[in-house]
Image (spheres, grey):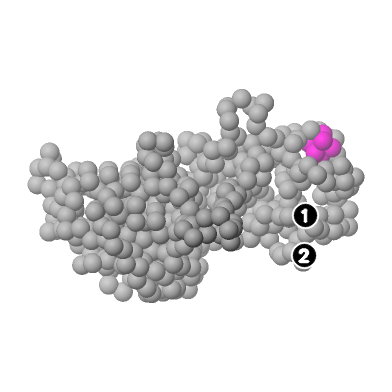
Amino acid sequence: MMVNLKSDTNEENNPTCFISYSWDNEEHKKWVMYLASKLQSNGIKVTLDEWHLQAGEDLHLFMEESIRNCDYVVIVLTPNYTKKANNREGGVGYENSIITGNIHKHLRKVKYIPIIKSGNIDNSIPEYLAGKKYISFLEERKFEDNLKALVHALYQKKINDIPPLGPNPFSKKETSNHHINLESSNDIIENEFINTNEILNEENNKYILIESGQKIPYLSSKSINSECIIYANIIHEEYENTVYLQHYEDSLHIDNLESVIKRYYSTFFANHHRVSAFSINQETCSWFGYGPLNFITAIKDQYHRYKDLKLRGEKIPHHEIAYFIDEWKDGIFFIGCQPSKVTKKEDSVIVGRVNIGFIFKKMPFDTKKYTDFFEYFQKTHLFYEPFKPLLKTKIINSKVNCEAFIIDNPHKEYGGWVCGIVGSNSKEINVSDSSFIDKIVVNFIPYHELSDKCEYNINSAKSMSLPTSGFTARIVNYKANCDLI
Protein backbone atom coordinates (compact mmCIF):
# COMPACT_ATOMS: atom_id res chain seq x y z
CA MET A 1 0.00 0.00 0.00
CA MET A 2 1.16 3.48 -0.86
CA VAL A 3 -0.68 6.35 0.88
CA ASN A 4 -0.03 9.48 -1.15
CA LEU A 5 0.04 12.29 1.42
CA LYS A 6 3.34 13.98 0.57
CA SER A 7 3.18 17.46 -0.95
CA ASP A 8 6.53 16.97 -2.64
CA THR A 9 9.59 14.77 -2.47
CA ASN A 10 11.72 17.17 -0.45
CA GLU A 11 12.96 15.16 2.52
CA GLU A 12 12.72 18.25 4.76
CA ASN A 13 8.91 18.10 4.48
CA ASN A 14 8.71 14.45 5.41
CA PRO A 15 8.03 13.47 9.04
CA THR A 16 10.55 11.50 11.06
CA CYS A 17 9.80 8.86 13.65
CA PHE A 18 11.58 6.62 16.13
CA ILE A 19 10.13 3.16 16.76
CA SER A 20 10.21 2.04 20.38
CA TYR A 21 9.61 -1.69 20.88
CA SER A 22 10.69 -4.68 22.94
CA TRP A 23 12.74 -7.57 21.58
CA ASP A 24 10.04 -10.17 22.35
CA ASN A 25 11.30 -12.69 19.79
CA GLU A 26 12.72 -12.89 16.26
CA GLU A 27 9.27 -12.90 14.64
CA HIS A 28 8.31 -9.72 16.49
CA LYS A 29 11.58 -8.01 15.46
CA LYS A 30 10.90 -9.00 11.84
CA TRP A 31 7.39 -7.57 12.08
CA VAL A 32 8.71 -4.26 13.43
CA MET A 33 11.27 -4.09 10.59
CA TYR A 34 8.48 -4.79 8.10
CA LEU A 35 6.38 -1.97 9.61
CA ALA A 36 9.39 0.35 9.43
CA SER A 37 9.95 -0.49 5.74
CA LYS A 38 6.28 0.24 5.02
CA LEU A 39 6.57 3.65 6.72
CA GLN A 40 9.77 4.38 4.78
CA SER A 41 8.03 3.56 1.48
CA ASN A 42 5.37 6.13 2.43
CA GLY A 43 7.96 8.89 2.83
CA ILE A 44 8.40 8.69 6.61
CA LYS A 45 12.04 8.70 7.72
CA VAL A 46 12.31 5.96 10.35
CA THR A 47 14.98 5.61 13.02
CA LEU A 48 15.30 1.98 14.09
CA ASP A 49 17.94 0.30 16.23
CA GLU A 50 18.33 -2.58 13.75
CA TRP A 51 19.15 -0.06 11.02
CA HIS A 52 20.98 2.77 12.74
CA LEU A 53 22.67 1.45 15.89
CA GLN A 54 26.10 -0.04 15.27
CA ALA A 55 27.97 -2.48 17.52
CA GLY A 56 29.90 -0.62 20.19
CA GLU A 57 27.73 2.52 20.12
CA ASP A 58 26.05 3.82 23.26
CA LEU A 59 22.50 2.42 23.44
CA HIS A 60 21.25 4.98 25.98
CA LEU A 61 22.59 7.91 23.95
CA PHE A 62 20.97 6.49 20.82
CA MET A 63 17.59 6.29 22.60
CA GLU A 64 17.85 9.81 24.02
CA GLU A 65 18.83 11.44 20.73
CA SER A 66 16.27 9.47 18.72
CA ILE A 67 13.37 10.38 21.03
CA ARG A 68 14.48 14.01 21.23
CA ASN A 69 15.25 14.60 17.54
CA CYS A 70 12.44 12.70 15.80
CA ASP A 71 9.07 14.33 15.16
CA TYR A 72 7.23 11.29 16.48
CA VAL A 73 7.76 8.19 18.56
CA VAL A 74 5.77 5.12 17.46
CA ILE A 75 5.45 2.81 20.46
CA VAL A 76 4.78 -0.85 19.57
CA LEU A 77 2.87 -2.26 22.53
CA THR A 78 2.86 -5.88 23.64
CA PRO A 79 2.35 -7.44 27.10
CA ASN A 80 6.13 -7.85 27.38
CA TYR A 81 6.75 -4.19 26.45
CA THR A 82 4.24 -3.03 29.06
CA LYS A 83 5.74 -5.24 31.78
CA LYS A 84 9.22 -3.84 31.11
CA ALA A 85 7.92 -0.26 30.88
CA ASN A 86 6.00 -0.42 34.17
CA ASN A 87 8.91 -2.13 35.97
CA ARG A 88 11.59 0.08 34.34
CA GLU A 89 13.40 -2.97 32.94
CA GLY A 90 16.06 -2.92 30.22
CA GLY A 91 16.08 -0.63 27.20
CA VAL A 92 12.30 -0.33 27.23
CA GLY A 93 12.44 0.82 30.84
CA TYR A 94 15.07 3.44 29.98
CA GLU A 95 13.02 4.71 27.02
CA ASN A 96 10.01 4.80 29.31
CA SER A 97 11.81 7.08 31.78
CA ILE A 98 12.74 9.45 28.92
CA ILE A 99 9.21 9.48 27.50
CA THR A 100 7.45 9.96 30.83
CA GLY A 101 9.79 12.87 31.56
CA ASN A 102 8.77 14.58 28.32
CA ILE A 103 5.20 13.47 27.71
CA HIS A 104 3.73 16.40 29.67
CA LYS A 105 5.37 18.78 27.19
CA HIS A 106 3.30 17.31 24.35
CA LEU A 107 -0.22 17.33 25.76
CA ARG A 108 -1.52 19.53 22.95
CA LYS A 109 0.89 18.44 20.22
CA VAL A 110 0.95 14.78 19.21
CA LYS A 111 4.41 13.21 19.47
CA TYR A 112 3.87 9.75 20.97
CA ILE A 113 1.68 7.34 18.97
CA PRO A 114 0.98 3.96 20.62
CA ILE A 115 0.05 0.95 18.50
CA ILE A 116 -1.05 -2.39 19.98
CA LYS A 117 0.54 -5.42 18.31
CA SER A 118 -0.50 -8.16 20.75
CA GLY A 119 -2.38 -8.65 24.00
CA ASN A 120 -5.25 -6.32 24.87
CA ILE A 121 -5.93 -2.92 26.43
CA ASP A 122 -5.67 -4.42 29.92
CA ASN A 123 -2.18 -5.92 29.61
CA SER A 124 -0.57 -4.02 26.73
CA ILE A 125 -0.90 -0.36 27.67
CA PRO A 126 1.69 1.04 30.12
CA GLU A 127 0.53 3.29 32.92
CA TYR A 128 2.02 6.43 31.37
CA LEU A 129 0.05 5.89 28.13
CA ALA A 130 -3.33 5.35 29.79
CA GLY A 131 -5.81 7.70 28.16
CA LYS A 132 -3.84 8.00 24.90
CA LYS A 133 -5.67 7.05 21.73
CA TYR A 134 -3.97 4.05 20.12
CA ILE A 135 -4.05 2.25 16.77
CA SER A 136 -4.78 -1.46 17.00
CA PHE A 137 -2.72 -3.85 14.87
CA LEU A 138 -4.24 -6.88 16.61
CA GLU A 139 -6.08 -8.16 13.53
CA GLU A 140 -3.49 -9.34 11.02
CA ARG A 141 -5.90 -9.15 8.11
CA LYS A 142 -6.47 -5.41 8.69
CA PHE A 143 -2.77 -4.53 8.61
CA GLU A 144 -3.12 -2.30 5.53
CA ASP A 145 -6.07 -0.37 7.03
CA ASN A 146 -4.15 0.14 10.27
CA LEU A 147 -1.01 1.16 8.39
CA LYS A 148 -3.07 3.76 6.51
CA ALA A 149 -4.31 5.17 9.85
CA LEU A 150 -0.74 5.31 11.20
CA VAL A 151 0.60 7.04 8.08
CA HIS A 152 -2.18 9.63 8.30
CA ALA A 153 -1.36 10.21 11.97
CA LEU A 154 2.35 10.72 11.20
CA TYR A 155 1.48 13.25 8.49
CA GLN A 156 -1.15 14.80 10.80
CA LYS A 157 -3.82 14.26 8.17
CA LYS A 158 -7.41 13.32 8.91
CA ILE A 159 -8.24 9.88 7.57
CA ASN A 160 -11.92 10.81 7.23
CA ASP A 161 -12.99 14.22 5.98
CA ILE A 162 -15.67 15.98 8.00
CA PRO A 163 -18.76 16.24 5.77
CA PRO A 164 -20.08 19.75 5.07
CA LEU A 165 -22.67 21.12 7.47
CA GLY A 166 -26.08 21.05 5.86
CA PRO A 167 -28.98 23.43 6.38
CA ASN A 168 -31.26 23.14 9.38
CA PRO A 169 -34.18 20.99 8.15
CA PHE A 170 -36.47 22.66 10.70
CA SER A 171 -35.60 26.20 9.66
CA LYS A 172 -38.69 28.23 8.79
CA LYS A 173 -36.95 29.24 5.58
CA GLU A 174 -37.31 26.76 2.71
CA THR A 175 -39.08 24.11 4.83
CA SER A 176 -41.85 23.76 2.31
CA ASN A 177 -39.74 22.40 -0.52
CA HIS A 178 -36.31 21.60 0.94
CA HIS A 179 -35.04 18.10 0.07
CA ILE A 180 -32.73 16.40 2.55
CA ASN A 181 -30.11 14.46 0.59
CA LEU A 182 -28.78 11.56 2.63
CA GLU A 183 -26.42 10.36 -0.09
CA SER A 184 -22.97 11.88 -0.46
CA SER A 185 -21.66 12.66 -3.93
CA ASN A 186 -18.11 13.19 -2.69
CA ASP A 187 -17.12 9.61 -3.60
CA ILE A 188 -17.87 10.23 -7.29
CA ILE A 189 -15.22 12.23 -9.09
CA GLU A 190 -15.29 12.71 -12.83
CA ASN A 191 -12.73 10.60 -14.71
CA GLU A 192 -10.87 13.58 -16.12
CA PHE A 193 -9.71 14.52 -12.62
CA ILE A 194 -7.95 11.25 -11.84
CA ASN A 195 -5.21 9.21 -13.47
CA THR A 196 -6.84 5.82 -14.02
CA ASN A 197 -3.71 4.29 -15.54
CA GLU A 198 -1.70 5.26 -12.46
CA ILE A 199 -4.30 3.62 -10.20
CA LEU A 200 -4.31 0.46 -12.33
CA ASN A 201 -0.51 0.23 -12.28
CA GLU A 202 -0.39 0.69 -8.51
CA GLU A 203 -3.01 -2.02 -7.92
CA ASN A 204 -1.32 -4.29 -10.45
CA ASN A 205 1.99 -4.08 -8.57
CA LYS A 206 0.60 -4.43 -5.05
CA TYR A 207 1.47 -8.13 -5.09
CA ILE A 208 3.96 -9.69 -7.49
CA LEU A 209 4.81 -13.30 -8.29
CA ILE A 210 8.47 -14.37 -8.35
CA GLU A 211 9.32 -17.71 -9.93
CA SER A 212 12.95 -18.80 -10.41
CA GLY A 213 14.06 -15.26 -9.56
CA GLN A 214 11.89 -13.70 -12.27
CA LYS A 215 8.78 -11.53 -11.99
CA ILE A 216 5.87 -13.15 -13.84
CA PRO A 217 2.32 -11.84 -14.58
CA TYR A 218 0.66 -15.17 -13.83
CA LEU A 219 1.50 -18.75 -12.87
CA SER A 220 0.56 -21.90 -14.76
CA SER A 221 -0.55 -25.13 -13.10
CA LYS A 222 -2.29 -28.38 -14.01
CA SER A 223 -5.90 -29.00 -13.06
CA ILE A 224 -8.66 -31.58 -13.15
CA ASN A 225 -12.24 -30.47 -13.97
CA SER A 226 -13.33 -26.89 -14.45
CA GLU A 227 -14.07 -25.18 -11.13
CA CYS A 228 -12.44 -21.74 -11.04
CA ILE A 229 -10.43 -21.18 -7.85
CA ILE A 230 -9.07 -17.75 -6.92
CA TYR A 231 -6.42 -17.68 -4.20
CA ALA A 232 -6.84 -14.56 -2.03
CA ASN A 233 -6.13 -13.69 1.58
CA ILE A 234 -9.56 -12.54 2.73
CA ILE A 235 -11.55 -13.09 5.92
CA HIS A 236 -14.35 -15.40 4.83
CA GLU A 237 -16.35 -14.97 8.07
CA GLU A 238 -17.11 -11.36 7.08
CA TYR A 239 -19.24 -12.70 4.21
CA GLU A 240 -21.55 -15.12 6.03
CA ASN A 241 -24.67 -13.12 5.11
CA THR A 242 -24.21 -10.74 2.23
CA VAL A 243 -26.06 -8.71 -0.36
CA TYR A 244 -25.03 -8.77 -3.98
CA LEU A 245 -25.64 -6.75 -7.11
CA GLN A 246 -24.98 -8.32 -10.50
CA HIS A 247 -25.24 -7.54 -14.19
CA TYR A 248 -25.11 -10.13 -16.97
CA GLU A 249 -23.86 -9.64 -20.54
CA ASP A 250 -24.02 -12.32 -23.24
CA SER A 251 -20.63 -11.24 -24.63
CA LEU A 252 -18.05 -8.45 -24.58
CA HIS A 253 -14.95 -7.74 -26.62
CA ILE A 254 -11.80 -7.91 -24.50
CA ASP A 255 -11.31 -4.15 -24.99
CA ASN A 256 -14.78 -3.52 -23.56
CA LEU A 257 -13.97 -5.76 -20.60
CA GLU A 258 -10.83 -3.69 -19.99
CA SER A 259 -13.01 -0.55 -20.11
CA VAL A 260 -15.27 -2.03 -17.41
CA ILE A 261 -12.24 -2.58 -15.15
CA LYS A 262 -11.00 0.96 -15.80
CA ARG A 263 -14.46 2.31 -15.02
CA TYR A 264 -14.51 0.38 -11.75
CA TYR A 265 -11.16 1.75 -10.55
CA SER A 266 -11.92 5.31 -11.70
CA THR A 267 -15.36 5.30 -10.05
CA PHE A 268 -14.21 3.67 -6.82
CA PHE A 269 -10.66 5.03 -6.70
CA ALA A 270 -11.23 6.33 -3.14
CA ASN A 271 -11.87 2.78 -1.85
CA HIS A 272 -8.97 1.15 -0.06
CA HIS A 273 -8.36 -1.83 -2.34
CA ARG A 274 -6.90 -4.72 -0.35
CA VAL A 275 -6.20 -7.40 -2.91
CA SER A 276 -7.04 -8.05 -6.56
CA ALA A 277 -6.57 -11.60 -7.83
CA PHE A 278 -7.70 -13.74 -10.74
CA SER A 279 -7.82 -17.27 -12.05
CA ILE A 280 -8.35 -18.73 -15.52
CA ASN A 281 -9.28 -22.37 -15.54
CA GLN A 282 -10.05 -25.11 -18.05
CA GLU A 283 -10.21 -28.90 -17.94
CA THR A 284 -6.48 -29.61 -17.77
CA CYS A 285 -4.74 -26.38 -16.80
CA SER A 286 -5.23 -23.18 -14.80
CA TRP A 287 -3.48 -19.84 -14.52
CA PHE A 288 -3.38 -17.64 -11.41
CA GLY A 289 -2.11 -14.14 -10.72
CA TYR A 290 -2.64 -10.74 -9.10
CA GLY A 291 -3.69 -7.38 -10.48
CA PRO A 292 -6.25 -6.04 -12.99
CA LEU A 293 -3.75 -5.48 -15.83
CA ASN A 294 -2.28 -8.96 -15.42
CA PHE A 295 -5.84 -10.34 -15.65
CA ILE A 296 -6.40 -8.67 -19.03
CA THR A 297 -2.91 -9.73 -20.17
CA ALA A 298 -3.62 -13.37 -19.25
CA ILE A 299 -6.86 -13.41 -21.26
CA LYS A 300 -5.20 -11.75 -24.26
CA ASP A 301 -2.36 -14.29 -24.00
CA GLN A 302 -4.75 -17.16 -24.68
CA TYR A 303 -3.13 -18.03 -28.01
CA HIS A 304 0.32 -18.30 -26.39
CA ARG A 305 -1.03 -20.20 -23.40
CA TYR A 306 -2.75 -22.75 -25.63
CA LYS A 307 0.31 -22.98 -27.85
CA ASP A 308 2.30 -24.06 -24.79
CA LEU A 309 -0.35 -26.69 -24.03
CA LYS A 310 -0.07 -28.08 -27.57
CA LEU A 311 3.71 -28.29 -27.25
CA ARG A 312 3.23 -30.33 -24.07
CA GLY A 313 0.72 -32.57 -25.85
CA GLU A 314 -2.14 -31.58 -23.54
CA LYS A 315 -5.82 -31.33 -24.42
CA ILE A 316 -7.18 -28.00 -25.71
CA PRO A 317 -10.66 -27.46 -24.21
CA HIS A 318 -13.75 -25.98 -25.83
CA HIS A 319 -13.82 -23.08 -23.40
CA GLU A 320 -12.21 -21.74 -20.26
CA ILE A 321 -13.48 -19.84 -17.22
CA ALA A 322 -11.94 -16.55 -16.07
CA TYR A 323 -12.71 -14.84 -12.77
CA PHE A 324 -11.36 -11.59 -11.30
CA ILE A 325 -11.98 -10.17 -7.83
CA ASP A 326 -11.00 -6.96 -6.04
CA GLU A 327 -11.66 -6.77 -2.31
CA TRP A 328 -12.07 -3.46 -0.49
CA LYS A 329 -13.30 -2.66 3.00
CA ASP A 330 -17.03 -2.95 2.17
CA GLY A 331 -16.99 -6.02 -0.05
CA ILE A 332 -15.83 -7.60 -3.29
CA PHE A 333 -16.06 -6.49 -6.92
CA PHE A 334 -16.12 -9.44 -9.31
CA ILE A 335 -16.03 -10.31 -13.00
CA GLY A 336 -16.69 -13.86 -14.17
CA CYS A 337 -16.66 -14.81 -17.85
CA GLN A 338 -15.85 -17.44 -20.47
CA PRO A 339 -13.21 -16.29 -23.00
CA SER A 340 -13.74 -17.60 -26.52
CA LYS A 341 -11.29 -20.03 -28.08
CA VAL A 342 -8.71 -18.23 -30.23
CA THR A 343 -7.47 -20.09 -33.31
CA LYS A 344 -5.00 -17.54 -34.68
CA LYS A 345 -2.44 -15.33 -33.00
CA GLU A 346 -4.01 -12.14 -34.31
CA ASP A 347 -7.58 -13.07 -33.39
CA SER A 348 -9.35 -10.90 -30.84
CA VAL A 349 -10.72 -12.51 -27.71
CA ILE A 350 -14.44 -12.30 -27.04
CA VAL A 351 -15.63 -13.10 -23.51
CA GLY A 352 -19.07 -14.63 -23.07
CA ARG A 353 -21.47 -15.19 -20.17
CA VAL A 354 -20.08 -12.14 -18.43
CA ASN A 355 -21.06 -11.70 -14.76
CA ILE A 356 -20.17 -8.27 -13.34
CA GLY A 357 -21.13 -7.25 -9.83
CA PHE A 358 -20.51 -6.53 -6.18
CA ILE A 359 -20.78 -8.58 -2.99
CA PHE A 360 -21.47 -6.35 0.02
CA LYS A 361 -20.88 -7.27 3.65
CA LYS A 362 -24.06 -5.32 4.35
CA MET A 363 -26.50 -3.24 2.35
CA PRO A 364 -24.61 -0.11 1.17
CA PHE A 365 -25.86 3.24 2.46
CA ASP A 366 -24.81 5.18 -0.64
CA THR A 367 -26.23 3.37 -3.68
CA LYS A 368 -25.83 6.23 -6.16
CA LYS A 369 -22.24 5.38 -7.08
CA TYR A 370 -23.26 1.84 -8.03
CA THR A 371 -26.08 3.21 -10.17
CA ASP A 372 -23.54 5.51 -11.85
CA PHE A 373 -21.19 2.59 -12.44
CA PHE A 374 -23.82 0.43 -14.14
CA GLU A 375 -24.90 3.30 -16.42
CA TYR A 376 -22.11 1.99 -18.67
CA PHE A 377 -24.47 -0.88 -19.53
CA GLN A 378 -27.49 1.43 -19.81
CA LYS A 379 -28.88 -0.31 -16.75
CA THR A 380 -31.02 1.99 -14.64
CA HIS A 381 -32.88 -0.41 -12.33
CA LEU A 382 -30.67 -2.24 -9.85
CA PHE A 383 -31.81 -5.10 -7.64
CA TYR A 384 -29.90 -5.88 -4.43
CA GLU A 385 -30.41 -9.52 -3.54
CA PRO A 386 -29.40 -11.54 -0.47
CA PHE A 387 -26.53 -13.94 -1.06
CA LYS A 388 -25.41 -16.58 1.41
CA PRO A 389 -22.13 -17.98 0.08
CA LEU A 390 -21.10 -21.55 0.83
CA LEU A 391 -18.31 -21.24 3.40
CA LYS A 392 -16.05 -24.17 4.21
CA THR A 393 -13.20 -24.54 6.69
CA LYS A 394 -10.66 -27.35 6.73
CA ILE A 395 -8.15 -27.85 9.54
CA ILE A 396 -4.79 -28.97 8.16
CA ASN A 397 -1.41 -29.87 9.57
CA SER A 398 0.92 -30.28 6.62
CA LYS A 399 4.28 -28.91 5.55
CA VAL A 400 4.59 -27.37 2.11
CA ASN A 401 7.66 -26.56 0.03
CA CYS A 402 8.09 -23.21 -1.70
CA GLU A 403 8.02 -23.20 -5.52
CA ALA A 404 7.42 -19.46 -6.03
CA PHE A 405 7.13 -16.32 -3.87
CA ILE A 406 4.47 -13.63 -3.51
CA ILE A 407 6.01 -10.24 -2.69
CA ASP A 408 3.99 -7.35 -1.32
CA ASN A 409 6.67 -4.65 -1.52
CA PRO A 410 7.65 -4.10 -5.18
CA HIS A 411 9.31 -0.75 -4.36
CA LYS A 412 12.45 -2.67 -3.38
CA GLU A 413 12.52 -4.70 -6.59
CA TYR A 414 12.76 -8.34 -5.43
CA GLY A 415 14.24 -7.51 -2.05
CA GLY A 416 10.79 -6.87 -0.55
CA TRP A 417 8.80 -8.85 1.96
CA VAL A 418 7.38 -12.29 1.27
CA CYS A 419 3.70 -12.52 2.24
CA GLY A 420 2.92 -15.87 0.61
CA ILE A 421 4.32 -18.78 -1.36
CA VAL A 422 3.20 -21.16 -4.08
CA GLY A 423 3.42 -24.85 -3.17
CA SER A 424 2.20 -28.26 -4.30
CA ASN A 425 -1.34 -29.40 -3.62
CA SER A 426 -2.28 -32.87 -2.32
CA LYS A 427 -5.42 -34.81 -1.46
CA GLU A 428 -4.83 -34.10 2.23
CA ILE A 429 -4.91 -30.32 1.81
CA ASN A 430 -7.18 -29.91 -1.23
CA VAL A 431 -10.42 -28.05 -0.35
CA SER A 432 -12.48 -28.68 -3.48
CA ASP A 433 -14.71 -31.75 -3.82
CA SER A 434 -15.06 -31.43 -7.58
CA SER A 435 -11.69 -30.26 -8.89
CA PHE A 436 -7.97 -30.42 -8.21
CA ILE A 437 -5.25 -27.87 -9.02
CA ASP A 438 -1.70 -29.09 -8.48
CA LYS A 439 -0.43 -25.74 -7.10
CA ILE A 440 -1.81 -23.67 -4.25
CA VAL A 441 -1.06 -20.27 -2.72
CA VAL A 442 -0.30 -20.18 1.00
CA ASN A 443 -0.51 -16.94 3.04
CA PHE A 444 1.13 -16.18 6.37
CA ILE A 445 1.95 -13.41 8.86
CA PRO A 446 4.46 -12.21 9.90
CA TYR A 447 6.10 -11.74 6.52
CA HIS A 448 9.75 -12.55 5.96
CA GLU A 449 12.52 -11.32 3.71
CA LEU A 450 13.24 -13.01 0.41
CA SER A 451 16.68 -14.08 1.61
CA ASP A 452 15.31 -15.85 4.72
CA LYS A 453 15.31 -19.64 4.92
CA CYS A 454 11.94 -20.78 6.22
CA GLU A 455 9.70 -23.76 6.84
CA TYR A 456 5.98 -23.50 6.12
CA ASN A 457 3.27 -25.52 7.81
CA ILE A 458 -0.32 -25.17 6.59
CA ASN A 459 -2.79 -25.05 9.50
CA SER A 460 -6.11 -24.26 7.77
CA ALA A 461 -7.91 -23.58 4.52
CA LYS A 462 -11.13 -21.64 3.99
CA SER A 463 -13.22 -21.38 0.87
CA MET A 464 -16.12 -19.17 -0.22
CA SER A 465 -18.41 -19.67 -3.20
CA LEU A 466 -19.01 -16.79 -5.61
CA PRO A 467 -22.18 -15.80 -7.48
CA THR A 468 -21.95 -16.93 -11.09
CA SER A 469 -24.19 -17.89 -13.98
CA GLY A 470 -23.26 -21.01 -15.91
CA PHE A 471 -20.12 -22.07 -14.01
CA THR A 472 -18.73 -22.36 -10.49
CA ALA A 473 -16.05 -20.30 -8.78
CA ARG A 474 -14.75 -19.86 -5.26
CA ILE A 475 -12.14 -17.96 -3.24
CA VAL A 476 -9.67 -20.12 -1.29
CA ASN A 477 -7.36 -18.93 1.48
CA TYR A 478 -4.66 -21.28 2.80
CA LYS A 479 -3.07 -20.09 6.07
CA ALA A 480 0.28 -21.27 7.35
CA ASN A 481 2.85 -20.77 10.07
CA CYS A 482 6.19 -19.52 8.83
CA ASP A 483 9.26 -20.45 10.91
CA LEU A 484 12.77 -19.19 10.28
CA ILE A 485 15.32 -21.97 9.96
Question: Mark 2 packing: few (<14 Cα in 10 Å), some, or many (20+)?
Answer: some
Give amino acid for label 1: Lys
Residue 226 at x, y percent in the picture? 23, 65
Q: Farthest residue in the left direction?
A: 343
Q: Is residue 440 visible?
A: no
Which residue is more in the foreground, 429 or 132?
A: 132
Residue, disc 1: 132
For marks 2 and 1, the one nearer the N-term is 2
Which residue is more in the foreground, 447 or 103?
A: 103
Give amino acid for label 2: Asn
Residue 17 at x, y percent in the picture? 71, 38
Label 2 SS: loop
Whether residues under marks 2 and 1 lie with C-beta atoms below 8 angstroms apart, the answer is: no
Which residue is more in the foreground, 134 or 323?
A: 134
Q: Is residue 63 magenta?
A: yes
Vertical position of residue 40 compared to residue 131: above or below: above
Label 1 SS: loop
Q: How many numbered tags mark residues here?
A: 2
Image-based side of 480 in relation to 311, left or right: right
Q: Which residues are magenta?
A: 62-68
Residue 324 at x, y percent in the picture? 32, 55
Q: Is residue 427 magenta?
A: no
Which residue is more in the foreground, 94 or 15?
A: 15
Residue, disc 2: 123
Question: Mark 1 packing: few (<14 Cα in 10 Å), some, or many (20+)?
Answer: few
Residue lying at 59% horizontally and 58% vertically, measured from the top left = 171
